[in-house]
Image (cartoon, helix red, strand yellow):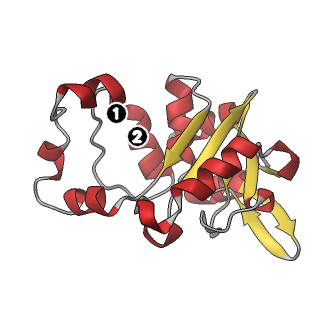
Amino acid sequence: MSARIAPESVSEELLEMTLALAEPERDLVILSEGNTSELIGDEIVVKASGSSMRTATRNDFVAASVDELVRLLRDPSADQDRLTAALTAGEIDGRPLRASVESLVHVAVRALAPVRYVAHTHPTDVVSLLASTQAASAFAEPVYTDELLILGRPLFVPYAQPGLELGRLFLER
């Protein structure tokens, strides 16, 4: 089992970022969807599946090995059952705790660059663009210079089933 329950590994910064991103007036997450993670050594501490970003506590995060999850992503024989087993950390207060199935997006980022924090949100305006027939072209190039300087090159990843399919596509792109 890769994942483990580790509330002591949740930094104040990760918790504050998670709660701040979920503030309704920011409109960055729809129904508190999305997740956040922090790289600590060779593990990511990532929000658990089914937990709300708006009400997250240290008990709503799971620690998992980046290397183990990257190996799973790159293993063509890996399936959703193996992923579920790797993300399952156990129970806390009778509630099953499993790292988000979208943890593989966070892992794919770390496979390319050891960034400390990753935030995956679903802003209404961006989701609207992604739901259009022009989604790929909307993100093909930066719109203005500041966007390029601050955010870098845009990356369009077409819809894929959350889990291995999305993680593999994200890693490939």
User: Would residue 161 be seen by someone viewing this image from the given angle?
Assistant: yes
Q: Secondary structure at mark 1?
A: loop
Q: Are marks 1 and 2 in contact (CB under 8 Å)?
A: yes
**Residue corresponding to mark 2:** 170
- Picture coordinates of residue 146, whole percent (x, y): 25, 27
Comparing 120 with 74, the one in front is 120
- Picture coordinates of residue 132, whole percent (x, y): 15, 61
Comparing 17 with 126, the one in front is 17
The residue carrying pointer 2 sits among few (fewer than 14), some (14 to 19) or many (20 or more) residues within 10 Å by Cα, namely: many
Left or right: 10 as drawn, with respect to 164: right
The amino acid beneath tag 1 is: Arg
- Picture coordinates of residue 77, whole percent (x, y): 54, 44
User: Would residue 6 be seen by someone viewing this image from the given angle?
Assistant: no
Q: Secondary structure at mark 2?
A: helix
Report the residue at 60% width, 66% height from top: 54
The amino acid beneath tag 2 is: Phe
Which image quarter is the C terminus in?
top left
Q: Quadrant of residue 145?
A: top left
Report the residue at 12% width, 43% height from top: 137
**Residue corresponding to mark 1:** 173
Q: Is residue 96 above or below residue 146?
A: below
Comparing 25 with 50, the one in front is 25
